[in-house]
Amino acid sequence: MKKIPERTCMGCNQKKDKSSLIRIVKNKEKGILIDKTGKLEGRGAYICNNINCLDKAIKSKRIDRKLETNISEEIYNKLRGVIIDKQ
């Protein structure tokens, strides 16, 4: 039986299947991206498809610390759009 990869949400701190989470990537060339495929190169952080988790992660600056950079409000707004689209 194949093991399903799990990742931890930066908002609620719960482990969930990697495929059910949204990945944010810090890439050397392109900066911060929202990775819909889950396969882009770079350091990744994961967030649930839940606006409350995103708000918690923004308030605690947990994604910023994980990716070791300041994330602009523009990226957070794009994330909000992706979460609302998926719900």
Image: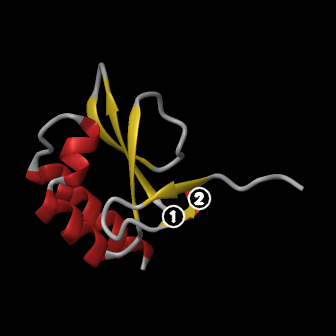
**Measured from the top left, where is residue 31 in percent x and y?**
25, 30
Which residue position holds label 1?
15
Which residue position holds label 2?
19
Q: Nearer the viewer, mark 2 or mark 1?
A: 1
Q: Determine whether the residue tagged by mark 1 lies in a helix, strand or loop.
A: strand
- Name the residue type under label 1: Lys
Q: Determine whether the residue tagged by mark 2 lies in a helix, strand or loop.
A: helix
Q: Quadrant of residue 27?
A: top left
**Measured from the top left, where is residue 43 in percent x and y?**
39, 33
- State the residue at coordinates (27%, 38%): 67
State yes or no: discs 2 and 1 in contact (Cβ < 8 Å).
no
Q: Dot 1: within a 10 Å radius of its alpha carbon, few (fewer than 14), some, or many (20 or more) residues?
A: some
Task: Count every numbered label the image shows and give the total.
Answer: 2
- State the residue at coordinates (29%, 19%): 29
**Measured from the top left, where is residue 55 in percent x and y?**
19, 70
- State the residue at coordinates (41%, 29%): 42
- Name the residue type under label 2: Ser
Q: Quadrant of residue 4?
A: bottom right
- Foreground pick, 47 / 82: 47
Q: Residue furthest right?
A: 1
**Measured from the top left, where is residue 32 in percent x and y?**
26, 37
Above/below status of 36 relative to 10? above
